[in-house]
Image: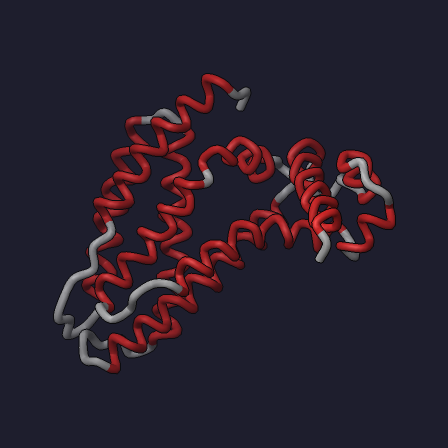
Amino acid sequence: MKKDNMDVRDKIIDAAHHMFAQKGYPRTTINDIITQAKCSKGGFYHHFVNKEQVMDAIMNNYVSELEVELFKLDTDNVFEALGNVIFTINSIKSSKMTEWPKLIKILSFPENEIFIRRMADSFSALLAKQYMEIFIKGNSIGAFMVEHPDHLAALWAREILELYRKADEVVFMDSKELTEKFLVLVSYSEQLLNATLKNSSGDVHFRDNLVEYVLNAKNVYRELKNVIDL
């Protein structure tokens, strides 16, 4: 694909990002996006069929990077691999901190439920796939016993999403009570996963890394609030 075409596509995605945050996904029209992107109608339809495809492109910018990094995970030690899924998420979220103001505006817009739901579904499916592969491998080498790897993977993926939802609350809201509750939740979640792995020959650790990420993220967010109107 030519560079100028890539530039137009990126401008459309950035424009949609802006409009979804300002007007909400349901009220944003293709003409709104075209006007904001300063491109032609033909330029828009060269890259996208409708605004739903643009929304998917925005989500894919976040999901695809995580997918690539998860693919690189070393699964020789299944216990480390289970913890490293969360380490990987933390690393990517940390690298995206400067984009938080833009993303927060989209996710906090009252009418953007469809965007939030689809992004959560995409992340959940990706995480469930990764966890199921690790659970199956752990079973095969006798590191632990999981009777239904697919069901546990789906349940654990949803638990991870809930952990990060709570983590975001701690980061974005200056509340000592929320922080304390989150610390208890993370500890319990780590204990719960380890208790679920029957006949386990090791332990999964992710609590300390996740807590460190949240505390660092709180500091970064405070700095962002000082220079950007959130």
What residue do we see at 26% from left, 39% from top?
212
Q: Position of residue 3 (x, y in %)?
A: 70, 49
Q: Position of residue 167 (x, y in %)?
A: 36, 40
Position of 185 with respect to 25 (left or right) is left
What residue do we see at 72% from left, 54% from top?
2
Front position in the image: 108 or 73: 73
Query: What is the quadrant of the N terminus in the image?
Result: bottom right
What residue do we see at 39% from left, 67% from top?
130
**Above-or-below relation of 200 to 170:** below
Front position in the image: 207 or 224: 224
Position of 178 with respect to 112 (left or right) is left
**Above-or-below relation of 125 to 223:** below
Front position in the image: 172 or 138: 138
Position of 173 with respect to 78 (left or right) is right
Describe the colour scheme in one phrase.
secondary structure
* Count of residue discs: 0
Q: Position of residue 102 (x, y in %)?
A: 57, 34
- Residue that protrudes farthest toward the top in the picture: 226
Q: Identify the image quadrant of residue 35.
A: top right
Front position in the image: 23 or 36: 36
**Above-or-below relation of 229 to 212:** above
- Residue that protrudes farthest toward the bottom in the picture: 140
What residue do we see at 31% from left, 51% from top?
87
**Above-or-below relation of 111 to 126:** above
Q: Position of residue 108 (x, y in %)?
A: 56, 35
